[in-house]
Image (cartoon, helix red, strand yellow):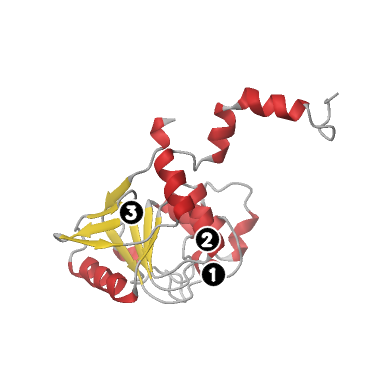
Amino acid sequence: MAENHITEVSGTGVPIRGNDIDTDQILPARFMKEVTFDNMADYLFYDARRDDDGTLNDHPLNVYEGANVAVVNKNFGCGSSREHAPQAMMRWGVDGVVGESFAEIFRDNCKSLGIPAATADRETVTDLQDWIEANPDGEIEIDVEAETVTYGGRTVDVEIDDAMKEALVEGIWDTTALMYSNLSKVEETAAQLAYVEGAD
């Protein structure tokens, strides 16, 4: 499962400013009726990215198309626990997130998708957001193992939750793939459970 090991993410950034950006802003509830995640990228920040007449505005996701490192502020992903929010971000192209803080369930959902969510203090995050705005094509690298972010010739320390770091670096974040790779053990365990149909 070596292809699942995530030790670093690099690319260009998109600054999404604002505290307490909740999952309903990230992925409006009306789009949750779809039975798959396939179209979620189209709905990411759907209302915030459009004016009242439906035309696209100057929201960062419209300006920094192709970016894959989102830089956010405090309590990002708060509100309801919908997995659709990080799914939409991943499908839009986000491979890593740097922020002041994340709602716990949002962060855990990121881990399950292989998206590093690194935290840093307000000054560090704001400096990075300012730098992205001045250098929209500038390269940013999140080093998961070293817990650093490098950009514009400087390296800053960030924090990555221990459980997330271990899962990403060891390649055990994709629990579905992990179960498939251990299918015989899963079936063996299931066969021993009295409440699983077909078990003795």
Disc 2 residue type (three-letter): Phe
Camera-nearest label, 3 or 1: 1
Comes first in the chain, label 3 or label 1: 3
Disc 1 residue type (three-letter): Cys
Q: Are marks 3 and 1 in contact (CB under 8 Å)?
A: no
Mark 2 to mark 3 CA distance (whole Å): 17 Å
Rendered residue at 44%/77% (across/down): 19
Mark 1 to mark 2 CA distance (whole Å): 7 Å
Q: Nearer the viewer, residue 90 or 144?
A: 144
Mark 3 to mark 1 CA distance (whole Å): 21 Å
Q: Are marks 1 and 2 in contact (CB under 8 Å)?
A: yes
The numbered disc on residue 68 is 3
Q: Position of residue 138 (x, y in %)?
A: 19, 58
Rendered residue at 31%/49% (across/down): 9
Q: Position of residue 67 (x, y in %)?
A: 30, 56
Q: Which residue is mark 1?
A: 78
